[in-house]
Image (cartoon, helix red, strand yellow):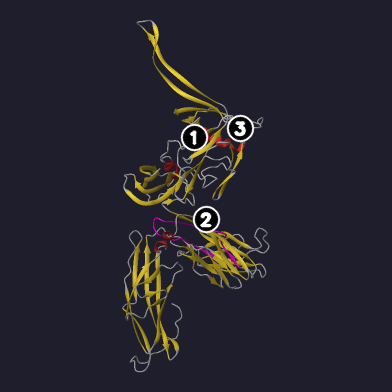
């Protein structure tokens, strides 16, 4: 029980003209007994009654004192408890509840506490203490084998001033739960060893100034401990030793990592200790997704850094800096936040199937085993709309599942399998796909645990080419007299085809942010116009100018007639093959020729006749140091004439 403040005597208690402020308890104590083999005891609620007269600004403060050197093991609550005070308004009778905290960490024994209520107020402009009452709680514990000796802080922050050689800060260590008691030894590098420790001891430096292994300025974490006489460690004593001079500020962390989960709204927090030897004024700024227990100050102490709620942030990784400024100086502490969401998908500005990242799913429920994805994709080819629906089941591996979203959509785009030689100008080929996903987390019995949706994702086939909005990577190319251009381009949410037949006087074409330059290649034998399906399922053009040869390759079915003892033909099959030389072309167009060979579909126009075909070329030379001008022989199988 601390010394009592002087109490203003209210006189005879009759009221008369004397001010008074009474506090009354319905009882003044209770005894609690806990057998650790059973559930913890429940404390009784007690009542505090107040009565005052001729008092302004009445106030009731409370303090809790513990007789034994252990961690606090109770706190009070109730509608009238606010911080360290009991609210005076709202009636004269206050019900106070007692909550036991951390008693499972206390060794067997008897523990005493005192809750002190102090009534004060203002009379005639003077603040006085009018009444003090105490409530006592005794706790008896037995059969508790889990408690252990510990110390009163997780970390002791001390500062060694290299100018003065003085150690300051959290230099007093209180030992908790040593109720037997045991005689203990404190040992830590750079600090004086203490023997026969029972309840507390002082941290004292040992040759820190001359230790060359310590930095001239900065913070070092030292792991000390309390040891029994047999040298076995019984408790950790963690010390953050900051070294420097008084004119600087220091923090005990070089970076902070946070991780929060979107499955349920939550925050995360971390504390950093700021050492401020000269009590300099400072200010702190943080990224928008962090809050601080204080944004400025002028003393040493802990500052709590807390994330905003996970419900307010998209899933993903965030980074920034906590910046402390003082005296035209600053300290920056990098901070990283990972917001774990069920669905992690950030396509950015990408709207092509092959460019968007996979969707990463994080297991949100411990019993989840399977991820089920229902995908609905709406396609529009030449004004004809189709909807394709698919269901995928993916198992979790190491608490994650990956869905290659873009590839699945890309493979389902409908294709135009007709030539473009007779299309009108500004021909609408297709619109972007519009995709909706329903993503469900299931347990091993396929019970639904969690569901989220991803809607209205708009995608074009293939990858975004370097010539965007032109769907081509070839921005410097040869042309010949009579070449026909098929320019595929993205216009808003559509792919449109521009056919250009009169190309003789065209040196360049402007496609918004892209300019294509054309180089006249006058030497040629024939003009053979080709367009083929590129990676964007759109036509890409090329002009072949070499010689060509068309052949029919036959397969015959015949057998020996046993009656006539001679072979007879029963059937045959025929395929038409086209061998054509490209003619000369620019070296940087070799990749374009390679794409022609890779393509699944091509249309070749020879003497006004159009052939549907695909390349069967087995070998394509990509580099030849002996070549001065490039040309290649290509083979095609003709599917349709």
- Segment colored magenta: 249-272
Residue under the point 45% across and 59% down: 313
The circle on residue 584 is 3
The answer to whether marks 3 and 2 mark residues whose Cβ atoms lie closer than 8 Å is: no
Disc 2 and disc 1: Cα gap in Å?
74 Å
The answer to whether marks 2 and 1 mark residues whose Cβ atoms lie closer than 8 Å is: no
Q: Nearer the viewer, residue 130 or 80?
A: 80
Disc 3 and disc 2: Cα gap in Å?
86 Å
Give percent across and percent down for residue 573.
42, 20
The circle on residue 599 is 1
Badge 1 or badge 3: first in the primary sequence: 3
Q: Number of labelled discs?
A: 3
Mark 1 Cα shell of 10 Å, populated few (<14), some (14-19), many (≥20): some
Badge 3 or badge 2: first in the primary sequence: 2
Residue 355 at least partly seen: no
Mark 3 Cα shell of 10 Å, populated few (<14), some (14-19), many (≥20): some
Give percent across and percent down for residue 466.
55, 45
Residue position marked by numbered label 2 in the rendering: 232
């Amino acid at each position: 029980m601390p010394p009592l403040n002087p109490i203003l005597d209210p006189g005879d208690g009759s009221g008369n003209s004397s001010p008074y402020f009474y506090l009354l308890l319905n009882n003044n104590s209770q005894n609690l007994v806990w057998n650790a083999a059973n559930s913890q005891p429940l404390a009784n609620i007690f009542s505090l009654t107040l009565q005052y007269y001729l008092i302004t600004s009445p106030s009731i403060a409370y303090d809790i004192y513990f007789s034994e050197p252990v961690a606090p093991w109770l706190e009070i609550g109730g509608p009238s408890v606010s911080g360290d005070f009991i609210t005076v308004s709202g009636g004269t009778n206050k019900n106070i509840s007692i909550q036991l905290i951390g008693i499972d960490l206390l060794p067997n024994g008897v523990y005493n506490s005192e809750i002190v209520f102090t009534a004060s107020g203002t009379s005639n402009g003077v603040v006085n203490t009018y009444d003090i009452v105490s409530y006592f709680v005794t706790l008896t514990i037995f059969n508790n084998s889990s408690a252990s000796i510990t110390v009163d802080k997780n970390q002791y922050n001390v500062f060694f001033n290299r100018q003065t050689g003085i150690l300051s800060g959290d230099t007093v260590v209180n030992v908790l739960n040593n109720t037997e008691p045991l005689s203990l030894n404190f040992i830590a590098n750079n600090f004086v060893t203490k023997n026969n420790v029972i309840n507390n001891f002082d941290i004292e430096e040992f040759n820190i100034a001359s230790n060359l292994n310590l930095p001239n300025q900065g913070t070092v974490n030292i792991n000390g401990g309390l040891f029994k006489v047999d040298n076995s460690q019984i408790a950790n004593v963690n010390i953050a030793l900051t070294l420097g001079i008084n004119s600087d500020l220091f923090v005990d962390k070089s970076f902070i990592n946070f991780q929060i989960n979107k499955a349920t709204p939550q925050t995360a927090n971390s504390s950093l200790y700021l050492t401020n030897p000269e009590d300099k004024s400072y200010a702190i700024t943080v990224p928008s997704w962090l809050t601080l227990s204080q944004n400025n100050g002028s003393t040493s102490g802990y500052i709590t850094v807390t994330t905003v709620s996970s419900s307010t942030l998209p899933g993903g990784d965030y980074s920034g800096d906590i910046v402390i400024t003082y005296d035209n100086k600053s300290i920056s502490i990098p901070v990283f936040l990972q917001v774990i969401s069920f669905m992690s998908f950030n396509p950015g500005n990408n709207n092509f199937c092959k460019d968007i990242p996979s969707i990463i799913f994080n297991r949100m429920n411990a019993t989840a085993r399977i991820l089920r994805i229902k995908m609905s994709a709406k396609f529009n080819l030449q004004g004809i709309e189709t909807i394709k629906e698919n269901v995928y089941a993916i198992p979790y591996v190491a608490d994650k599942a990956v869905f290659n979203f873009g590839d699945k959509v890309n493979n389902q785009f409908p294709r135009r399998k007709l030539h473009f030689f007779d299309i009108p100008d500004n021909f609408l080929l297709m619109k972007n796909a519009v995709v909706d996903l329903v993503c469900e987390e299931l347990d091993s019995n396929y019970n639904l645990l969690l569901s989220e949706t991803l809607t209205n994702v708009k995608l074009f086939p293939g990858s975004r080419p370097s010539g965007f909005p032109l769907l081509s990577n070839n921005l410097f190319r040869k042309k010949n007299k009579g070449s026909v251009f098929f320019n595929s381009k993205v216009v808003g949410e559509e792919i449109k085809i521009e056919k250009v037949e009169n190309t003789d006087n065209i040196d360049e074409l402007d496609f918004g942010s892209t300019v294509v330059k054309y180089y006249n290649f006058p030497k040629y034998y024939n003009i053979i116009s080709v367009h083929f399906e590129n990676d964007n399922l759109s036509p890409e053009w090329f002009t072949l100018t070499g010689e060509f040869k068309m052949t029919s390759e036959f397969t015959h079915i015949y057998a020996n007639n046993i009656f006539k003892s001679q072979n007879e033909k029963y059937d045959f099959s025929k395929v038409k093959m086209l061998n054509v030389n490209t003619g000369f072309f620019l070296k940087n167009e070799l990749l374009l020729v390679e794409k022609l060979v890779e393509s699944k579909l091509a249309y070749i126009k020879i003497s006004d006749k159009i052939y549907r075909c695909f390349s069967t070329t087995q070998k394509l030379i990509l580099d030849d140091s002996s070549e001065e001008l490039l040309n290649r022989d290509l083979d095609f199988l003709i599917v349709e004439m």
